[in-house]
Image: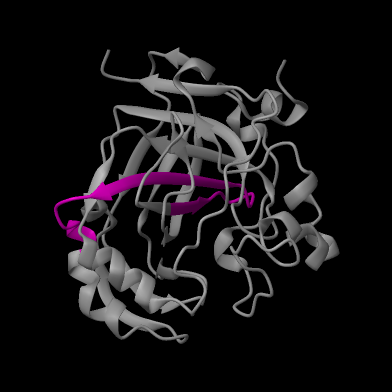
Amino acid sequence: MRSAVEERWFYPRWKRGVSSDGPDKRPLAEPYTYDQNPENGPEGWSKLDHQWKICNHGKLQSPIDLTRGRVSRVHDEAWKIHHKPAEAVIMSRGHDIMVSWKGDAGKMMIDHTEFKLVQCHWHSPSEHTINRTRYDMELHMVHTSAEGQTAVIAVLYKLGRPNEFLTTLQNEIKTVGKEEKKLGIVDPRTIGFHTDKFYRYVGSLTAPPCTEGVIWTVVKKVNTVSMEQLAALREAVDDGFERNSRPVQDTNGRSVWLYETNV
């Protein structure tokens, strides 16, 4: 049985969803870590701030394992993407490296609701797993609607050939700091991912405040990243955040859909 939030969000009624603060609104100085430490690690996040209580007590938390036997297949087009080049900046938030677009970088549409691209950032290793397989890296493209709702595209990576998008940013990543650094025009389409097969479910932000009601679209096709590019991202974050992935959370009976639009 779906939860009340899922009934309000799930296809075809996405736009009746829950408001959510975007991940880009988290403060720079954060007391939490990703260490397996019960005090300030993922198991103790709810104890660090009363506004983070949902991190350890919510029922729609992310990331999750996308197990083949748990998903329902849907042969339908459930989104449209219209990304485009725009002015962008890069900065370190300590726990990760973020590229944010200052101009109009386009949007994606989910059931007639428009979500504008705001920023992207990286986690390593991946946060979501597929059939319990954890990959080497995960990119999050964060979108927000006019009503403040959040939708995230997640792209998984394994070690292999260099990633084109990271190649264009390699010099800036090596010199990134805590202040925004202008990148000029950045085309989010160079991130490059397949849009014909993807998982979708309702979850949360994967770091405090762990706000629920986030629409997750996890691309099924796994991309590649080189060891050098992965090392550069880990070198650029603050000490202790080289591995900045939250453990997989309980699905609590949530619905997970696998969309196959080319079938």
Structure colour scheme: one colour
Please report the residue visible at 21 percent of the width from the left and 54 percent of the height from the top: 190
- Closer to us: 110 or 199: 199
Q: Quadrant of residue 195?
A: top left
Looking at the image, can residue 174 be seen? Answer: yes
Would you place residue 170 above or below residue 68 in this image? Answer: below
- Closer to us: 173 or 186: 173
Looking at the image, can residue 192 be seen? Answer: no
Can residue 145 be found in the magenta stretch? yes
- Closer to us: 233 or 203: 233
* Location of residue 110 in the rendering, given as x and y in whole percent from the top left corner: 48, 33
* Location of residue 55 in the rendering, given as x and y in whole percent from the top left corner: 73, 52
Please report the residue visible at 85 percent of the width from the left and 62 percent of the height from the top: 50
Please report the residue visible at 82 percent of the width from the left and 62 percent of the height from the top: 47
What span is colored magenta in the figure?
141-166
Please report the residue visible at 41 percent of the width from the left and 58 percent of the height from the top: 124
Relative to 23, 200 lies left or right: left
Would you place residue 51 above or below residue 55 in this image? Answer: below
* Location of residue 109 in the rendering, given as x and y in whole percent from the top left corner: 44, 37
Q: Quadrant of the C terminus?
A: top left
